[in-house]
Image (tube, rainbow, N blue to C red):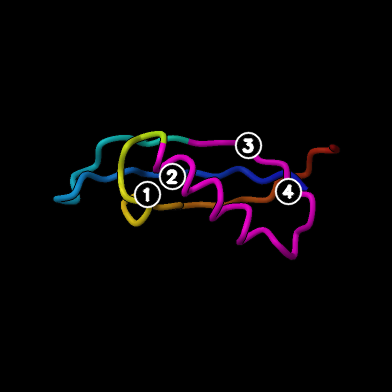
């Protein structure tokens, strides 16, 4: 399954600092929450912010053959 994620990153005083998106291939749809959580934590680390300051605003499943 392929999903399209949209995320927003905020500073400690909750000012928007960056927006982004990602196409993600999910092996097991039943575990999508774990895969999205892992991605969020990794992206927050990359951006140098706390994980709770990175918000997934949208997840949409796409009909793309893998």
The local crowd at label 4, few if under 14, some if 14 to 19, many if 20 or more residues have their Cα within 10 Å, is: some
Q: CA distance from mark 4 to mark 3?
A: 10 Å
The mark tally for this picture is 4
- Separation of marks 4 and 1 at Cα, in angstroms: 20 Å
What range is drawn magenta here? Answer: 21-45
- Mark 4 or mark 1: whose residue is earlier in sequence: 4
User: CB of mark 2 within 8 Å of CB of mark 3?
Assistant: no
User: Is 37 inside the magenta-drawn segment?
Assistant: yes
The C terminus lies in quadrant: top right
Residue 30 is left or right of residue 53, and the answer is right
The answer for how far apart the CA atoms under marks 4 and 2 are is 17 Å
Which residue is identified by label 4?
26
Residue 4 appears at what percent x and percent y? 61, 43
45 or 11, nearer to the observer = 45
Dot 4 falls on a residue whose secondary structure is loop
Q: Mark 1 and 2 residues: CB-CB less than 8 Å, in contact? A: yes
Q: Quadrant location of residue 63? A: top right
Element under disc 1: strand
Q: Residue at x 14, y 50 (%)?
A: 13
- What residue does disc 1 label? 54
- At a point 78% along the width and 48% down the height, the residue shown is 1
Residue 7's tag is 2
Pointer 4 or 2: first along the chain: 2
In this rendering, the label closer to the viewer, 3 or 1: 1
Mark found first going from the N terminus, 1 or 2:
2
Q: In this rendering, which labeled residue sits more in front, label 4 or label 2?
A: 4
Gap in angstroms between the C-alphas marked 2 and 3: 12 Å
Q: Residue at x 37, y 36 (%)?
A: 19
**Left or right, residue 47 beside residue 34:** left
Secondary structure mainly formed by the magenta segment: helix
For mark 3, what is the residue? 23
Q: Secondary structure at mark 2?
A: strand
């Amino acid at each position: 399954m392929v999903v399209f994620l949209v995320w927003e990153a905020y500073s400690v005083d909750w000012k928007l600092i960056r927006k982004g998106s990602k196409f993600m291939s999910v092996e097991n749809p039943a575990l999508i929450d774990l895969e999205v959580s892992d991605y969020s934590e990794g992206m927050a680390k990359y951006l140098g912010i706390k994980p709770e300051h990175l918000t997934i605003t949208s997840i949409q499943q796409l009909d793309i053959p893998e």
